[in-house]
Image (spheres, rainbow, N blue to C red):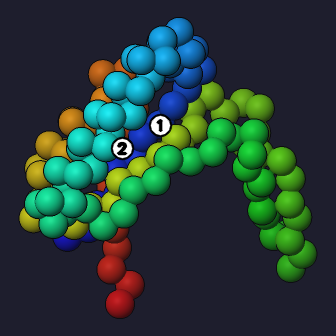
Amino acid sequence: MKYLIMIYSNPASRAMWETFSPAEQTEGWARHAELRDAMAASGELVHSEALAPPGAAKVLTTRAGRPQVTDGPFAEVKEHLAGFYLVDCDSLDRALELAAGIPEAPYVTIEVRPVVDLG
């Protein structure tokens, strides 16, 4: 079964990251690389990516058959999707175990959601 493990950031976690020294930031990225490598070695990693900051986003809505594009996200949004891991593992419990290994897990929201097979 596939699960999407979503890593959310927020102003407080972003501010905390900015206080880290370059060596501490490098260590954080290295922990992600180790986790990604372990998931790949076990055959559970399908794909993972970090995402650009929300200021780089565009929001598309279609109203009355016409697409409208605005800058995003909306100002009232506090949390944003910072990155994800798409995994294929045996159970939700295993996906949650993998999610618990994400370096930011003690500081941010991690959402684990089953992927619906539309095939």
Q: Which percent across, then down, holds residue 57?
A: 73, 49
- Residue at 21% x, 36% y: name it: 101
**Residue 95 is at least partly visible in this image:** no
Q: Residue furthest front?
A: 23
User: Would residue 25 be found to the left or right of residue 95 on screen?
Assistant: right
Judge by depth and name the residue closer to the eye, 112 or 47.
47
Q: Which percent across, then down, holds residue 81?
A: 53, 43
Judge by depth and name the residue closer to the eye, 58 or 42.
42
Judge by depth and name the residue closer to the eye, 81 or 62.
81
Q: Mark 1: few, some, or many residues within 10 Å (few <14, many ≥20)?
A: many
**Secondary element at image label 1:** strand
Compared to residue 85, the image places residue 7 above or below, namely above
Q: Give the quadrant of the C terminus.
A: bottom left
User: Would residue 70 be found to the left or right of residue 52 on screen?
Assistant: right
> Looking at the rendered structure, which numbered label has been put on residue 111?
2
Q: Mark 2: few, some, or many residues within 10 Å (few <14, many ≥20)?
A: some
For the residues labelled 2 and 1, say whether their Cβ atoms are less than 8 Å apart: yes
Q: Which percent across, then down, holds residue 82?
A: 52, 41
Count all numbered tags in the image, as a single digit. Answer: 2
Q: Give the quadrant of the N terminus.
A: bottom left
Compared to residue 60, the image places residue 28 above or below, namely above
User: Would residue 17 be found to the left or right of residue 88 on screen?
Assistant: right
Q: Which residue position is annotated with label 1?
A: 8
Mark 2 residue type: Glu
Query: Upstream in the sequence, badge 2 or badge 1?
Result: 1
Q: Which percent across, then down, holds residue 107?
A: 37, 21
Judge by depth and name the residue closer to the eye, 26 or 52.
26
- Residue at 88% x, 64% y: name it: 68
Compared to residue 42, the image places residue 105 above or below, namely above
Residue 33, picture quadrant:
top left
Mark 1 residue type: Tyr
